[in-house]
């Protein structure tokens, strides 16, 4: 299929922020003379996302993630650049675009507060004009996968966070959207519910070819759900690649943690100098960062043990979280 | 259109289910509105115990005008009550984002998300007052008259809705325009009395600026003989339609501003 799910070119969004002096005097002054400061939330983003891709869209708070997603969803109008979701301009043809997208926005509910979950689903079925039999088939599947059976007759306001999030997720996928935006879908949830949710996203996306854009602070979400990572920093994309590539780039990075016998001092064997880097540590342990490619763990350990009184040691493979932190520091660009 | 009617029915059905769960709330709500209106009528009757007529208008004529105002307001109150909450419940909380992501007209969704059952009290009292007043005034109702009454009440409701929507739209630029809507709506109380008792300025404002005059007094004039204002009475549905179009345009303008600032 040649058509892209999401195509973004030179996307820019600015906000006017009203500035005022502190205190009551400042507030009164602001009534008459308004000073604005322009803040560029998104500074020229290009994106091409293929149908069925699952993209982790990450960055610090204020990096421009939700602003981008709001533009992808048609809620905000770009100041410059273009957005197309399956060929549709989301802002110009908002309602047409709305039919092909689904969304979960962490804190806000898509469901209807006072009415039971089942009725909420029914209403969404009508809103999206889902054929009745297709709807029933989908709901049955979701009930099983997300264990919703016991929740169906409970009003949404009475659900716990984990229960609510499972229902939200079902609601977002109910009309079989082509693209789903998930903003922090696992925030504050127990580990087993997180697992259920991640498995659900993977399964549905595989089955229907749903394109998923996932923003999260939980790197486990990215690792288990996504096949591509885009890192945003201060309104710019600083990294965009397959998740395997990201892992491979740092794949050979290892850290050796060493604890010595009491009273002995550490000596770096001459054979390894230049090939390892000693990291600053707060406690007694010594940490050596090295590249698995340049020197194997086995060789390094042999050298260390030969000239030190080692009590304990372990090799650590960096986690996703550390990889991302590395990205921010080194500013690797795609 | 058919789709929207079906959707509204679904939304409403859910409201009624919730309402039945909280029967006590429903009753208290209806009774409180009932009490409110009753107090206004009680006050009016006390005034008329001391005066024969108000600038040439009798008690039952004023009661008739009241009746139309109540019925129009009831339509607004029952079905369009959510317009009050646009600022603090939708724009400020980001709920509008959710609404904009659905393939249904956003204003329709906001309106459909609430049915204010308290308004049924108003409907009841408005109907009773109108019936009582027309009996006392010895009015004879033809089928045509009943049809016109229906249109006038609908138009009255539309004007309340238009004014509410217009001023609620300011929430796109203000933190919350609710105080403004409140202030404007307090003017509607004036409109329940014959406009001839007011100065030219107030009459002008209630006719051409904020057309609350068309919510009760002018339409009532269609049914009174020899009181004049027939043209104004006949203009009521047109004024209602124009007000609604203007308010909806302004709302669309606000929505566009929202899409560019997102606040």
Image (cartoon, helix red, strand yellow):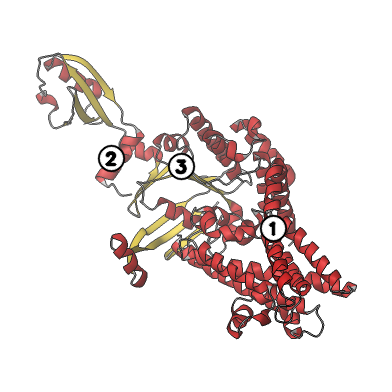
Q: Which mark is residue B108?
A: none
Residue placed furthest toward the front: B50
Report whether residue A20 is seen: no
Residue A147 image position (x, y, % from top left): 61, 30
Residue A218 lies, with reference to residue B39, above or below; the image says above
Q: Nearer the viewer, residue B229 or B39?
A: B39
- Left or right? Give the position of A329 relative to A189: left
- Left or right? Give the position of A65 relative to A158: left
What secondary structure is found at the residue carrying circle 1? Answer: helix
Residue B46 lies, with reference to residue A247, above or below; the image says below
Do the residues indicated by labels 2 and 1 lie within the same chain of the protein? no
Upstream in sequence: badge 3 or badge 2: 3
- Left or right? Give the position of B119 relative to B166: right
Which of label 2 and label 1 is nearer to you?
Answer: 1
Q: Which residue is mark 3?
A: A184
Q: Which residue is mark 1?
A: B78
Q: Residue at x 37, y 40 (%)?
A: A245
Which of label 3 and label 2 is nearer to you?
Answer: 3
Q: Could you classify mark 2 by the number of other residues whose Cα lies within 10 Å: few (under 14), some (14-19), or many (20 or more)?
A: few
Q: How many marks?
A: 3
Residue A230 image position (x, y, % from top left): 39, 47
Q: Residue at x 20, y 20 (%)?
A: A258
Query: What is the distance, in whole Å, between disc 3 and disc 2 at their CAs?
Result: 22 Å
Q: Chain of mark 3?
A: A
Residue B239 image position (x, y, % from top left): 68, 78
Q: Which mark is residue A326?
A: 2
């Amino acid at each position: 299929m040649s058509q892209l799910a999401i195509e973004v070119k030179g996307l820019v969004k600015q906000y006017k922020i009203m500035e005022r002096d502190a205190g009551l005097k400042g507030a009164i002054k602001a009534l008459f003379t308004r000073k604005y400061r322009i803040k560029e939330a998104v500074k020229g983003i290009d994106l091409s996302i293929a149908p069925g891709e699952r993209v982790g869209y990450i960055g610090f708070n204020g990096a421009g993630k939700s602003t981008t997603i709001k533009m992808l969803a048609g809620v905000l109008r770009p100041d410059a650049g273009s957005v197309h979701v399956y060929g549709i301009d989301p802002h110009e043809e908002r309602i047409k675009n709305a039919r092909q997208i689904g969304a979960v926005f962490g804190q806000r509910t898509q469901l209807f507060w006072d009415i039971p979950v089942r009725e909420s689903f029914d209403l969404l079925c009508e809103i999206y004009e889902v054929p009745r039999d297709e709807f029933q088939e989908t709901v049955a599947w979701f009930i099983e996968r997300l264990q919703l059976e016991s929740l169906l007759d409970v009003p949404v306001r009475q659900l716990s966070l984990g229960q609510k999030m499972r229902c939200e997720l079902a609601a977002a996928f109910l009309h079989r959207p082509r693209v789903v935006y998930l903003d922090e879908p696992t925030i504050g949830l127990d580990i087993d519910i997180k697992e259920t949710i991640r498995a659900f996203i993977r399964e549905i996306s595989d089955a229907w070819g749903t394109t998923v854009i996932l923003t999260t602070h939980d790197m486990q979400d990215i690792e288990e759900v996504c096949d591509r990572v885009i890192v945003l920093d201060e309104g710019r994309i600083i990294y965009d690649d397959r998740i395997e590539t990201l892992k491979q780039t740092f794949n050979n990075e290892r850290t050796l943690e060493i604890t010595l016998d009491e009273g002995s001092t550490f000596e770096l064997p001459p054979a390894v100098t230049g090939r390892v880097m000693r990291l600053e540590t707060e406690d007694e342990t010594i940490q050596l960062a090295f590249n698995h490619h340049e020197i194997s763990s086995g060789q390094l350990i042999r050298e260390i043990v030969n000239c030190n009184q080692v009590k304990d040691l372990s090799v650590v493979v960096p986690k996703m979280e550390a990889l991302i932190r590395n990205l921010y520091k080194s500013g690797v660009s795609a | 259109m058919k789709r929207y009617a079906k959707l509204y029915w679904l939304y409403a059905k859910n409201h009624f289910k919730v309402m039945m769960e909280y029967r006590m709330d429903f009753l208290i709500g209806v009774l409180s509105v009932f009490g409110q209106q009753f107090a206004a009528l009680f006050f009016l009757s006390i005034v008329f115990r001391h005066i024969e007529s108000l600038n040439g208008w009798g008690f039952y004529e004023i009661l008739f005008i009241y009746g139309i105002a109540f019925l129009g307001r009831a339509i607004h109150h029952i079905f369009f009550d959510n317009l009050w909450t646009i600022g603090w419940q939708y724009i400020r909380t980001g709920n509008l984002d959710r609404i904009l992501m659905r393939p249904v007209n956003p204003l329709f969704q906001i309106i459909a998300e609430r049915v204010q059952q308290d308004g049924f009290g108003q409907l009841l009292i408005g109907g009773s007052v109108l019936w009582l007043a027309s009996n006392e005034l010895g009015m004879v109702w033809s089928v045509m008259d009943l049809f016109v009454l229906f249109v006038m009440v609908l138009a009255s409701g539309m004007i309340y809705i238009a004014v509410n929507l217009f001023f609620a739209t300011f929430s796109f630029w203000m933190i919350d325009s609710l105080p403004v809507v409140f202030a404007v709506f307090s003017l509607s109380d004036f409109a329940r009395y014959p406009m001839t008792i007011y100065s030219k300025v107030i009459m002008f404002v209630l006719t051409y600026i904020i057309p609350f005059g068309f919510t009760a007094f002018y339409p009532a004039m269609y049914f009174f003989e020899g009181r004049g204002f027939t043209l104004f009475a006949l203009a009521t549905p047109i004024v209602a339609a124009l007000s609604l179009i203007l308010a909806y345009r302004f709302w669309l303008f606000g929505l566009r501003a929202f899409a560019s600032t997102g606040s």
